[in-house]
Amino acid sequence: MAPMNYRTLGRTGLKVSEIGFGAWGIGQKQWVGAKDEDSVAALERAIALGLNFVDTALAYGDGHSEQVVGRVARKHAGKLLVATKIPPKNRLWPARRDIPVKEVFPSDHVVSCTETSLRNLGLETIDLQQFHVWTDEFAGQGDWLSALEKLKQQGKIRFFGISLGEHTPDNGLRLVASGLVDAVQVIYNIFDPSPGEKLFPLCRKLGVGVLARVPLDEGGLTGRVTPATVFPDGDFRNSYFSGDRKRQVFERVQRIAADLGIGLEGMPEAALRFALSHPAVSTVIPGMRSVRNAEANCGIADGRGLPEEQLRKLESHRWERNFYVN
C-alpha cells in the first residue's frame, strides 16, 4: 500500500491527509448498525495508515459521534486534527433565506455548542469549528463573528469553516470572498461536480480549504446499491434511495463503469479519485464504519487523481437532482 499523501488546508497551513474520516455514520442515529467497537477499530486502522483528519458534528447522534471520535483523538493527542460543526439553533436543515442569522447562530448558541463539543470530545481545542448550515444572506449579519473571535482568543477553536447545504455550492461565495472563512465543506462527486465551476476557483484564489463530502453519493457510487438492496429500518438511506431511486442510481453507475472501462468493484476508487482530482480539494471525507472500508479508502490516497481522459468522459454523467428531498 502506497504511503498517505497530504495536502494543505488552504491558508491554515494545516497538512491534512488526502482521505479524511467522515464520522456521520458512526453516530448510531441516522445511519443504523454502527457499533462503537467497529467504529473505533476503523478509525484506528485509518490513523495507522496515515489518516490525520476527522470530521464530525454535534448533531451526529446527538453528540455520540463526537464522543467516539474523542476516545481515539485523546489517545493520539496532537496527531489527529478534529473538525466538528455547530447545529442551527432552530434545527432547520438546510438554512432558510427568510430566517435571520440571529435565530440560527446567535453568539450564545455558538459558544455553548462549542463548549458542549469540547466536553464530548474531551479536548481543549477544536481544530476546525464549522457552521452546519449556511446561506449567504447570513453574511454581514448577527453577532456570530464576535463569538468565534472570542473562542479563538480563548484557544477553544483554531479555525472556522462552513458546511454548505445539499447541492448549493454557490451559496457560500459571498462569505468566501469576505475572507472570514478558513474552510468550506461541500458535496462534490461524479454526479454533482458543480462546486468546480465557481466555488473551487474562488477558494483557490483566496486560500480557502475545501472538504469534499459525499464523494460516494451516500453509497450510490460504490456500485453496491442495487434495486434489491435493503437498508435497516430507521436508516436515512431508506429515504435517500426511496421509490425508484435505487434502480436509477444502479443503471447510471453501470454506465459510468462501462464508460471508464472498469468493473463495478472499481467504482469506489474511481469516485474517490475523481474528488481528489481537483486541485482545490484539500481532503475527501468518506464515511467508513469498518476496517475493510478504512483500508480501501486510505489505500487510494497516494497523490493520484483520475487521468484527464477519464475526467472528460465523466462530464457526461453529471446528474442534477436532490435525493435529500422526498
Image: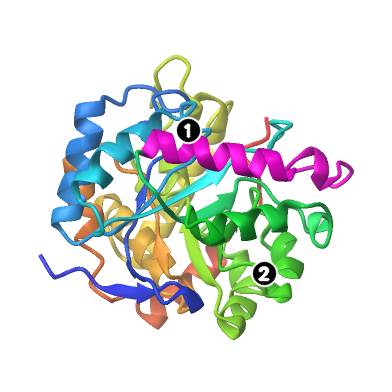
Majority secondary structure in the magenta region: helix
Q: Residue at x 20, y 31 (%)?
A: 38
Eyeballing the image, is 150 above or below 90?
below
Which residue position holds label 2?
180
Q: Residue at x 47, y 57 (%)?
A: 155
Front residue (pair 197, 199): 199
Residue 258 - label: none
Viewed as shown, does residue 24 lie left or right of 152? left
Front residue (pair 93, 114): 114
Viewed as shown, does residue 251 lie left or right of 132? left
Residue 134 location, x and y as percent? Answer: 70, 51
Q: Residue at x 26, y 27 (%)?
A: 36
Viewed as shown, does residue 189 lie left or right of 147? left
| Callout 1 amino acid | Tyr
Eyeballing the image, is 261 above or below 104?
below
Magenta region: 95-121
Image-quadrant location for residue 18:
bottom left
Give the spatial CA distance, label 2 vs label 1: 26 Å
In this view, the residue farthest toward the bottom is 205
Residue 257 location, x and y as percent? Answer: 36, 58
In this view, the residue farthest toward the front is 154
Residue 248 location, x and y as percent? Answer: 53, 40
Regarding mark 1 in the picture, which secondary structure is present there? loop
Q: Is residue 103 visible?
A: yes
Q: Quick check: marks 2 and 1 in contact, CB under 8 Å?
A: no
Circle 2 packing at 10 Å, graded few (<14), some (14-19), many (20+), is some
Eyeballing the image, is 52 above or below 68?
below
Residue 310 location, x and y as percent? Answer: 40, 74
Which residue position holds label 1?
60
Regarding mark 2 in the picture, which secondary structure is present there? loop
